[in-house]
Image (cartoon, rainbow, N blue to C red):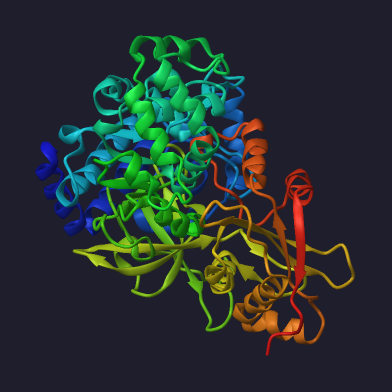
Amino acid sequence: MAMNGYEGGLKMIEELTTNAGQIQDKVLREILSRNAGTEYLRGFLHGQTDKQLFKKNVPIVTYEDLKPYIDRIVNGETSDILLAEPITGFFLSSGTSGGQRKLMPVTAQVAKKWELFRGLYESLVIKHIVDINQAGKRMELMFARPEIETPSGLMAASVTASIFKGSGFRASLPKLYTSPSETIFCPDPNQSLYCQLLFGLIQREEVVMIGSFFASTVIRAIKFLENHWQELCYDIKTGRLSHQITDSRCRNAASLVMKPNPEQADLIENICNCKSWDGIIRKLWPKARYIAGICTGVMRQYTAELEFYSGGLPLVSSLYASSEAFCGINIEPLCKPSDVSYTFLPNMAYFEFLPVKNERDESIEMKSNNEDTELVDLVNVKPDQCYELVVTNSTGLYRYKVGDVLMVSGFHNNAPQFQFVERKSVVLSVDMEKTSETDLFKAVTEAKALLDPLGFILTEYTSYADTSSVTGHYVLFWELKEKEDKHCKELDPKIMVECCFRMEESLHYTYKIYRKRNIIAALEIRVVKQGSFEALMEYCVSKGTSLSQYKKPSCIKSEEALKILDSRVIGKYFSPKSPL
């Protein structure tokens, strides 16, 4: 199937989703015919490529199961341990979702799949919003960590860095993006962000889209702008880059385009120098048509704050992808963030689904992975059911549990649409109860509503299970911000205590029973000073996480991360009584 222009992309989406079952069978057949002779698959398939034999014999695995094989390739053995096609490098996952950085083999086919995947979701943006390639420029905030050389001589990089390195992407930069490559590949994320904001402000009249891979990065950029707008305005006014930017490539890129522009600087200064930054994005970039960034999953917590800054611009969550596979696109890009569903594209990988039990008033629990568990094919999933995603791809992952729990929200033609529910591995527990990411989000959403009349916004939160005492309890770290920058409002301790109780009331039945029986102690909210979560992010970035891929953990497991937040606590509040 060829794709010519956005209408060709729309036609391809229809063809792919209509013929989803046949395409899935073809994808699996191609993967098996190419790789059945590899060391890994030979032990299960004995050189055969039959689908039923594959489903019967090939085990469902996690990264830990495949790690010994991947490590052998990383250390220099030939890639035919896992796959027949030569590998060109490795994807390096962020490690901020599940706590472990993973290396995934990459082949030349991956870049081609990405170009097709991107072309398909951009055809939907053109249809519903704007032909961004013709209307103006994208102020897309992009960060590429330096590659790491493995013992095999092959390089490992984040998914985003690999995309940014592509020749097609680099060729499109000057025409379509405000950020030159020198700023994207700057090894210092703060210098990179400063320069990308500077270039975006200089070209503000051309910008039709503001975004990044995750919504959290857009929020970080606006907070960074709040702290540095005066310095940025001075640079624009004088035509000279701040002496604090020491990266020579960034300085060279700036010298090519910067010239004194006092009028532009005064205009930006007047916009930024206001008591409230409500709608600041639309004010600074008046021709912007939308804000791009994934707003689902753990990113849901940023939508309220992003809507505050957006000035009514739609928040577009275009795609669902991971280091393991490009999976689905949002065919209704103008829907509300809470309504986003991703339509799976059957040509991207072979998808199976492990059923997940969702009992009323209970957190999500996985079914035991025993021999009787039947994985469901893509076209056979049931509406309103939850599943864990299992991927077989062309780069050496076979029946691989990604760790994402998805719910079927409907179908487009014969291809299912999924809403992201949560990461399977992220749970709070102090005894036998399990509190999922979704449980936590629901409880926080209920509690933070109490802050609205006080003029405060909850900008960040995370959690951990404190089991240092005999009776453990849940701890929530909250970072708050005033809606209007007056710095004169004080938190009412009674309201914060009520927030603790409201959270407990909103948690699942098991939690409430355990709390009533004093098996779990009172829930605690620790308010941290502004900038605390930025310090947490900077710590993770210093450990090798790419800023483009950083996802703030819903549950803290690192002692170092815990110390960072605990050292910035300015108030502690406890639930006053057990929930009914």
Q: Position of residue 262 (x, y in %)?
A: 36, 22
- Indicate the quadrant containing the C terminus: top left, top right, bottom left or bottom right: bottom right
- In front of the other: 573 or 96: 573
User: Could one spot residue 492 in this view of the protein?
Assistant: yes
Residue at the far bottom: name it: 580
Q: Identify which residue is drawn at 28% across, 51% down.
A: 345
**Residue 42: % across, % down:** 48, 41
Image height check: is 383 above or below 379? below
Rendered view: 56 above or below 471: above
Horizontal side of 250 relative to 563 (left or right) equals left
Given residues 287 and 55, the one toward you in this image is 287
Q: Position of residue 504 (x, y in %)?
A: 66, 78
Decide if residue 78 is in sight here: no
Along the line of sight, the residue nearer the viewer: 529 or 54? 529
Which of the 4 quarters of the picture holds residue 32? top left
The N terminus - image quarter: top left
**In the image, residue 92 above or below residue 214:** above
| Count of numbered tags | 0
Q: Which quarter of the figure has residue 331?
A: bottom left
Vertical relation: 458 (above or below) 374: above
Residue located at (52% from left, 71% from top): 372
- Tell me the residue at 61%/80% (across/down): 508
**Is 534 or 228 nearer to us in this picture?**
228
Residue 461 located left or right of residue 145: right
**Does residue 59 appear to the left or right of 171 in the view shown?**
right
> Where does the image place residue 59, in percent across and percent down from the top left?
52, 54
Q: Residue at x 30, y 23 (%)?
A: 173
